[in-house]
Image (cartoon, rainbow, N blue to C red):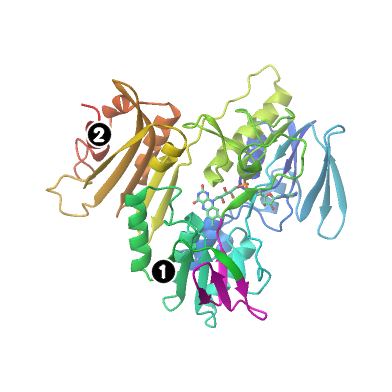
C-alpha cells in the first residue's frame, strides 16, 4: 500500500494524519514519529491551566497515542527522526531507549514545528528558568505560579506569549511581582499600532504588571537558582525568568531543501517543498502572505492546522489519484486575537507601521463608537477600529489590515477582514456588504461601515 510518513505528531501533523486516515482509508498507510512523550498539547491551554481557567491540563489534550493507534496509524512515540534518505525514501528514528527504527515512504510530511528562541547570555542554565511551549514547560510555569518561595518573576518578551504569561501568573497569584521586559518601546507592537498598544499597556499596568520597555536582558546571575537579572538599564532581583522572545522553525533535518522566511522550509501553494515528494506544514514551513503576496513565517496553530490538512490531502491525492489537481492553499495574513483580562483585541494583515516598512503608501482610518445604538444602555461597549489601506487609484482603496479593540468579544468580525484580505477587496467593495442588524447586538450602520465611510464618500 502507498505510505505517507509524517515527522512530528502535534497540531499540523495530526491534521495531516487525520485527513489521510479519514479520507483515504484503505488506500494510504500512515506512519508517524514523535520525539516527545505526549501529543496535541498547545501552550495557550497550558497558560489557561496556570491561571486556573482549566482544572486539569491533561483534559486539554485532544489526541493520544492510543487514539491514533485505534485508527490504524503506526506511531513511534519518544522517537526522534535523525536522518532522512531522499534517494532511497527512508526515515531513521532513534527512540529514547536508543532503539533504531527505519521506515520507508512514498511521500513525506515534515511537521517538526518550532522551538523557543533563547538568547546566548550567561546564567541561562540556572534553575527556575523556563520557556512557554511544551507540556513540560507548562508544569514548570505551574510550579512558578504555586511556589510561594517565588516572589518575583521576570518575563522576557512582550509579544503574545509574554503578555498571556503575565496575565496567567497574575490570575494565579495576586502577591507575585511580575515585570515584563522588551527591547522595543511598545508591548505587542508587532500586531498593533500605537492606540491599541496604549490599551494593552493600561490593562497590564492596572493589573500590576510592571512594564520595562526599551530594556535588553544582558545576563542572569544566581548561585544555583536565578537571583538577579541585568539589563542595559538596571539590575533586578527575581526568583524566576520566563523566556517568550519568539520561535524559530525546526528545519534542520533536510538541509538540501530550499529555505524561505526565517529559515523555514519554503513550500509552494500546494504545501510541497523544493523536493516535490516532500511536504512541510505548520511552524517549520513558510506560508503565503495574502497582503505581501510573498512567503512569510507566521507560527500560528490556525495556520499549522489548515496547512496540515492541505499537506495530508495533497500527499495522499498525489499517490492515489495522480491525475487530480492538488488543492492550493489560501493566503494568510496573521489573523490573531488576544483576550487580556477580559478585554479583547483582534488584528489581521499589516499594521500601519508594518505597511509603511513593507513599501506600501499606506494610510489608516480610526473610528470609535458604541457597539449598539445609544438607546441600548445594557452592555453597550465601546469598540475601536483601525483600517489600514492604500489608495490604488482615484476610486479604489485596497484594504491592507484591520485592528479592533473592545471590552466585549467582537473578535468574530475579524473573519470578515481576513476574507477581504484574501480576496484583495477594496474599501469600496466592503462598504455595502450584507452585514446583519439586530439592535441588541449592533447598529444598523455599524462601526465597520462607518469607518469606511470616512474614506469612501
Ligand atoms: C503559549 C502559546 C500560546 C499559543 N497560542 C496560540 C493561539 O491562541 N492561537 C494560535 O493559532 N496559535 C497559538 N500558538 C502557536 C501554536 O502553538 C503553534 O503554531 C503550533 O503549535 C504549531 O504546530 P506544529 O504542529 O506546526 O508544531 P509544534 O507544535 O511545534 O509540533 C511539532 C512536533 O514535532 C515534533 N518533532 C520535532 N522534531 C522532531 C523529530 N526530529 N522527530 C520526531 N518528532 C519531532 C515535536 O516534538 C513536536 O511535537 C501558541 C503557542 C504558544 C507557545
Which residue is located at x 64 percent, y 34 percent? 311
Q: Is residue 228 magenta?
A: yes
Mark 1, secondary structure of its residue: strand
Q: Residue 220 sits in which quadrant? A: bottom right
Q: Residue furthest left?
A: 375
User: Which of the labelled discs sits on residue 209, or is there none?
Assistant: 1
- Residue at position x 36%, y 69% in the image: 207
Q: Is residue 59 visible?
A: yes
Q: Residue 200, how many percent across, how many down?
A: 37, 57
Quadrant where the C terminus is found in the figure: top left
Quadrant hosting residue 198: bottom left
Position of residue 88 in the picture relative to residue 354 (left or right): right
Q: Is residue 101 magenta?
A: no
Q: Is residue 439 above or below residue 54?
A: above
Residue extent of the magenta highlight:
220-245
Image coordinates of residue 33 in percent, x first then y, are 75, 47
Residue 415's place in the image compared with 35, above or below, is: above
Distance CA(mark 1)–CA(mark 2) = 36 Å
Name the residue carrying label 2. Answer: 449
Q: Does any portion of residue 139 appear in the rendered image? A: no
**Is residue 106 rendered to the left or right of residue 444?**
right
Residue 343 locus on image (x, y percent): 34, 56
Report crowding for label 1: few under 14, some 14 to 19, many 20 or more residues within 10 A (C-alpha): many
Amino acid at each position: 500500500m502507498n505510505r505517507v510518513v509524517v515527522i512530528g505528531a502535534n497540531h499540523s501533523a495530526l491534521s495531516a494524519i487525520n485527513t489521510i486516515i479519514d479520507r483515504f482509508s484503505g488506500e494510504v498507510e500512515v506512519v508517524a514519529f514523535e520525539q516527545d512523550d505526549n501529543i496535541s498539547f498547545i501552550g495557550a491551554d497550558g497558560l489557561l491551566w496556570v491561571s486556573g481557567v482549566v482544572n486539569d491540563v491533561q483534559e486539554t489534550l485532544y489526541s493520544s497515542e492510543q487514539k491514533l493507534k485505534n485508527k490504524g496509524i503506526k506511531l513511534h512515540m519518544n522517537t526522534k527522526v535523525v536522518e532522512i534518505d531522499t534517494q532511497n525514501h527512508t526515515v531513521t528514528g532513534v527512540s529514547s531507549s536508543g532503539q533504531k527504527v527505519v521506515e520507508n515512504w512514498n511521500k513525506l510530511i515534515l511537521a517538526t514545528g518550532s522551538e523557543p528562541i533563547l538568547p546566548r547570555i550567561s546564567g541561562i542554565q540556572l534553575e527556575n528558568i523556563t520557556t512557554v511551549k511544551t507540556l513540560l514547560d507548562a508544569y514548570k510555569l505551574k510550579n512558578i505560579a504555586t511556589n510561594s518561595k517565588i516572589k518575583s518573576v521576570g518575563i522576557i518578551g512582550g509579544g503574545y506569549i509574554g503578555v498571556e504569561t503575565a496575565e496567567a501568573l497574575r490570575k494565579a497569584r495576586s502577591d507575585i511581582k511580575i515585570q515584563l521586559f522588551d527591547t522595543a518601546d511598545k508591548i505587542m507592537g508587532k500586531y498593533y499600532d500605537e492606540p491599541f498598544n496604549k490599551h494593552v499597556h493600561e490593562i497590564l499596568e492596572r493589573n500590576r504588571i510592571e512594564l520595562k520597555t526599551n530594556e535588553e536582558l544582558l545576563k542572569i546571575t544566581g548561585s544555583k537558582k536565578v537571583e538577579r537579572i541585568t539589563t542595559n538599564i538596571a539590575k533586578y532581583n527575581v526568583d524566576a525568568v520566563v523566556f517568550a522572545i519568539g520561535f524559530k522553525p525546526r528545519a534542520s533535518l533536510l538541509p538540501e531543501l530550499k529555505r524561505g522566511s526565517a529559515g523555514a522550509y519554503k513550500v509552494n501553494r500546494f504545501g510541497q517543498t523544493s523536493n516535490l515528494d516532500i511536504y512541510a506544514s505548520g511552524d517549520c514551513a513558510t506560508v503565503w502572505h495574502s497582503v505581501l503576496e510573498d512567503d512569510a513565517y507566521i507560527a500560528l496553530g490556525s495556520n499549522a492546522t489548515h496547512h496540515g490538512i492541505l499537506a495530508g490531502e495533497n500527499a495522499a491525492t498525489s499517490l492515489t489519484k495522480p491525475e487530480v489537481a492538488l488543492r492550493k492553499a489560501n493566503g494568510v495574513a496573521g489573523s490573531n486575537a488576544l483576550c487580556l483580562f477580559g478585554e479583547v483585541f483582534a488584528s489581521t494583515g499589516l499594521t500601519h507601521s508594518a505597511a509603511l516598512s513593507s513599501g506600501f503608501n499606506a494610510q489608516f482610518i480610526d473610528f470609535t463608537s458604541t457597539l449598539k445604538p445609544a438607546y441600548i444602555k445594557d452592555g453597550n461597549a465601546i469598540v475601536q477600529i483601525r483600517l489600514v489601506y492604500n489608495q490604488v487609484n482615484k476610486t479604489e482603496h485596497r484594504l491592507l489590515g484591520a485592528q479592533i479593540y473592545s471590552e466585549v468579544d467582537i473578535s468574530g468580525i475579524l473573519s470578515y477582514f481576513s476574507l477581504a484580505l484574501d480576496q484583495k477587496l477594496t474599501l469600496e467593495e466592503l462598504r455595502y456588504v450584507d452585514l446583519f442588524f439586530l439592535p441588541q447586538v449592533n447598529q444598523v450602520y455599524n462601526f465597520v461601515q462607518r469607518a469606511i465611510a470616512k474614506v469612501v464618500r
